[in-house]
Amino acid sequence: MIISPKIRGFICTTAHPDGCAAHVQEQIDYVKSKPALANAPKRVLVVGSSTGYGLASRIVPAFGGGAATIGVFFEKEGSDGKTGSAGWYNSAAFEEAAAKSGLYAKSFNGDAFSKEVKQQVIDAIKADLGQVDMIVYSLASPRRTDPETGEVYKSVLKPTGETYTNKTLNTDKKQVDTVTIESANEDEIAQTVKVMGGEDWKLWIDALSAAGVLADGFKTVAYSYIGPELTWAIYTDGTIGRAKLHLEQTARELNAAYGADTAVVSVNKALVTQASSAIPVVPLYISILYKIMKAKGTHEGCIEQIQRLFADHYGAANGPVLDDKGRIRIDDWEMRPEVQEEVEKVWNVITTEQLDELSDFAGYQKEFLKLFGFGLAGVDYAAEAEPVRPVASIG
Ligand code: NAD
């Protein structure tokens, strides 16, 4: 079939298998262009490994450190006449490239919140690797079924104080609009914490520990975001920020249980991913940020960010450098005062008419399409493409 993008609001309902493969290869090539990782973990489990930060967290230790990887994700397989999801195609391409390089890779497509998937992963570790040295927790999900009660929790993206009004970007209409979002109630906050907080991260680590598949001195990292004050109402001080506070609390609990410096939260840069494009206000902030960081030569994508996480932090002789709250800060370049001062100036004046001049909306759109395998060099989008692509270890 001929596969082209079908955009509905902030998602694209189609994905191009060859484009996704080219996107994965681009990231592998970047990692291979860097020096091999020092102190690299050799057996890595990535929960949420098919797109965005999680995919980069699988590629970096594999192709930069020769690690065996197990990936967990929730994606849709393609069928005749219907494309699969980008994460499925990314994982198919990752496994193909790993096999070519002689790297062990196994993938699980299912609900990471469930006991069943945790058990399947434990069985695979026991059978193939014995133990894991590192667990990256990179889930972004709108809902979670509690594995004990079966209750379904839903996350919302809302402020927690006052009703919030700010500029936002209607990415479909290429229009700077104003958005007003009602504050969340206590139940919505609690549900968001259940989905995006640290409860499931701890369940993973406890289950792996009980099964005896954690190596001595293992490390685990989960991802968070802070950003500038102009996004705080919707992010850091909003429902998702509450969940991220819980994630940080969970890191402290894990360290108390498994040893200091075992668990850490890494605060990452704002980037176009399937998860972030759904957050109001953030796409406009990202479009402005990209223009400023590109001009300064400090722009990074997921792969550059995670390369820095492994090379500069986990690869450092004394381990990761932490901030005063015990977090890794690879958002450091984004948060530089000279970057944020410029963002604020632009934020205050930007309108639809100046979107192209004052922001990198073109770059945002390009990156968004790339997430689904569109706009990659060397891919013939006019040619017939086969939508059924196996992830080798799943079949
Ligand atoms: P993403 O949407 O690209 O990736 C989410 C991953 O989770 C995918 O692999 C998906 O398959 C998987 N997933 C979702 N639900 C699942 C389920 N029930 N079972 C198994 N797998 C499931 O998101 P992302 O932006 O890379 O976010 C990853 C983490 O990074 C999140 O914690 C997010 O808050 C954080 N983060 C993102 C940004 C950003 O700007 N994108 C910035 C800082 C931190």
Image: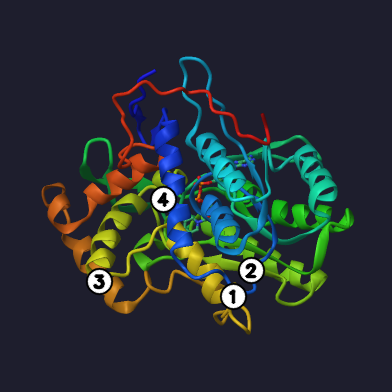
The alpha-carbon separation of the residues under discs 3 and 1 comes to: 26 Å
Return the residue at label 3.
296
Which amino acid type is shown beneath numbered disc 1? Gly
- Label 2, on which residue? 40
Q: Answer yes or no: do the residues labelled 3 and 1 have beta carbons within 8 Å? A: no
317 versus 161 height, above or below: below
- Quadrant of the rendered image containing residue 227: bottom left
Is residue 182 something one can see in this rendering? no
Residue at x-position 41% and y-position 28%: 14
Identify the element where label 1 is drawn. Answer: loop
Q: Residues within 10 Å of mark 3 (few under 14, many from 20)?
A: few
First reached walking from the N terminus: tag 4 or tag 2: 4
Q: N-terminal of the two: label 4 or label 3?
A: 4
Residue 48: percent from left, percent from top: 60, 47
Quick one: label 1, few (<14), some, or many (20+) residues within 10 Å? some
In this view, 356 is above or below 14:
below
Q: Amino acid at mark 4?
A: Glu
Question: Mark 1 = which residue?
Answer: 315
- Is 200 drawn above or below residue 386 in the view shown? below
- For the residues labelled 2 and 3, the Cα–Cα distance comes to 30 Å
